[in-house]
Amino acid sequence: MLISIKELRRCYNVGGEQVWALDGVSVEIGKGDFVAVMGASGSGKSTLLNILGCLDVPTSGEYVLDGISVAGMSRRELAAVRNRKIGFIFQNFNLLPKTSARENVELPMLYRSGLKTVERRHRAEELLKEVGLDDRMLHTPSQLSGGQQQRVAIARALMNNPPLLLADEPTGNLDSHSTVEIMEFFRRLNNAGQTIVMVTHENDVAAYAKRKIIMKDGKITS
């Protein structure tokens, strides 16, 4: 089992009142699974994704990622887990605007010691070839379409061979053609064994996943 969370709760203090973004969430996600998390705004899906990605910490409950209990870790420890275990893909791509596609993809490996520049560059180039951008490696984000930028972001997320890929509305800023391209690539990644957890509000996008988690008011309803 890659992910196991039990009775996860997350409380925020908003205007002097307690707001429970997650309220007793329990779920298991196996290696090689492809899960779509769905729900209305305020349902808790983004909070769940942030905790799964070690960007936030639960108020209470248990979270075990790839055999490691992370719920009580410090910020520094969480950062190390993120770098080793998790790849992120965002709706807005989050690419550095003045750097090339290859340099953007190299970023996650800059924090790994003992790796030579030539090895890092070779890995980035191989990933860009895999996502069909071997002729765009030196282009900056402004010289790429939305679909191409998202493929750069996917290559960057895969740079450290993470066991878990998290995608937050990965097709939200794409046209229908680019959406199909990205989701077909996700399907190929998953067929090759990559575990993917994706937040989306689009049913046609969620249809690519093997199963769906539906959330409402901080709880999993189905």
Image (cartoon, rainbow, N blue to C red):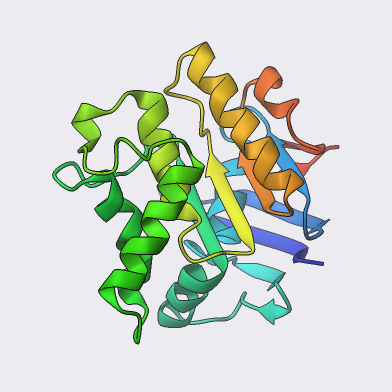
Instruction: Say if 193 sits above or below 133 in the image.
Output: below
Instruction: Pinpoint residue 171: horizontal percent, then vertical percent.
Output: 51, 27
Q: Is residue 206 left or right of residue 59?
A: right
Counting labels gives: 0
Which residue is pictured at 29% across the width and 51% down the height? 102
Which residue is pictured at 54% across the width and 67% down the height? 57
The single residue placed furthest to the right in the displayed view is: 222
Instruction: Pinpoint residue 160: horizontal percent, then vertical percent.
Output: 48, 66
Residue closest to the eye, 186 or 25: 186
The single residue placed furthest to the left in the displayed view is: 98
The quarter in which the N terminus is drawn is: bottom right
Task: Name the quadrant containing residue 110.
Answer: bottom left
The single residue placed furthest to the top in the displayed view is: 176
Which residue is pictured at 69% across the width and 18% down the height? 204
Which residue is pictured at 62% across the width and 51% down the height? 48
Look at the image and tell me whether residue 201 can be seen: yes
Residue closest to the eye, 126 or 201: 126
Instruction: Pinpoint residue 72: horizontal percent, then vertical percent.
Output: 59, 80
The quarter in which the C terminus is drawn is: top right
Task: Name the quadrant containing residue 141.
Answer: top left
Look at the image and tell me whether residue 14 can be seen: no
Task: Name the quadrant containing residue 147.
Answer: top left
